[in-house]
Image (tube, rainbow, N blue to C red):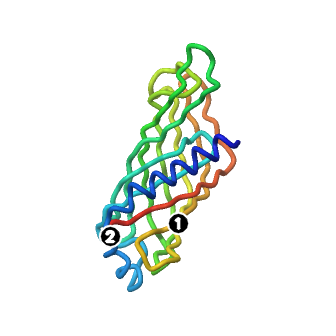
Amino acid sequence: MRRHMLKSVSALTLSALVLMAGSWAHAEEQAAGKLMSGFHPFALGATSGGPQTSMILGGVIVDPGLILMAGLGLKYDGNAAKGADKVGFDFVLHLEYMLVNMARFAMGPEVTYHGFVSQAGSNADAFSTNVVVPGWAFWFAPFPVPLALGTAWNLPITFQKGADPVLQTSTWQLRLCFIFG
């Protein structure tokens, strides 16, 4: 538990440091209209439970409130069995559409695809495990800067080669994003 929290905090800290290099021009648009609007580069650091790993994504906001992202999820398992991979990563594709899109708040449906290239603690083949995660995203921008906090209610569906699909109970995520101007 402690290790997972450290990885989550590390992912968010890294995301914040990397993303602070952008401009603050989007803050004026947020105050005047919609939180997710215009065509802007968008970066996201997200942590979550369930089958997902900590993720760092980059993408674009496509007017009016459509968000397209891609990135990598990373996981390290120091307790992996001898001969198994200790480091795993997955390719992530993400799509959101903000049905409610106000100046400081946005929410709407989302879907994420995780294609596990390598799995920590396993010697499974690349893409032998795939996860599709439909959900509902919530974004809030409490400050007059292009920084938003978010969460999502998700329902991961895991497809593993040679096995039946697995549907998990809902998982919540903590998200931090910086919208470059």
Residue carrying label 1: 149
| Amino acid tagged 1 | Leu
As drawn, which residue projects farthest toward the bottom?
Answer: 32
Callout 1: few (<14), some (14-19), or many (20+) C-alpha neighbours within 10 Å? some
| Mark nearer the viewer, 1 or 2 | 1
Image quadrant in which you'd find residue 122: top right
The quadrant of the picture occupied by the N terminus is top right
- Find residue 19 and report its horizontal and vertical position in percent: 38, 59
* Residue positioned 64% across, 36% down in the render: 166
Image quadrant in which you'd find residue 96: bottom left
- Find residue 28 and report its horizontal and vertical position in percent: 35, 82
The one of 18 and 74 positioned closer to us in this rendering: 18
* Residue positioned 51% across, 28% down in the render: 87
| Amino acid tagged 2 | Asp
The quadrant of the picture occupied by the C terminus is bottom left
Q: Is residue 79 above or below residue 175?
A: above
Residue carrying label 2: 63
Classify mark 2: helix, strand or loop: loop
Classify mark 1: helix, strand or loop: strand
- Find residue 154 and report its horizontal and vertical position in percent: 60, 53
Labels 1 and 2: the sequence-earlier one: 2
* Residue positioned 52% across, 43% down in the render: 132
The answer to whether mark 1 and mark 2 are in CB contact below 8 A is: no
Q: Is residue 121 left or right of residue 33?
A: right
How far apart are the alpha carbons under marks 1 and 2? 20 Å
The one of 60 and 76 positioned closer to us in this rendering: 76
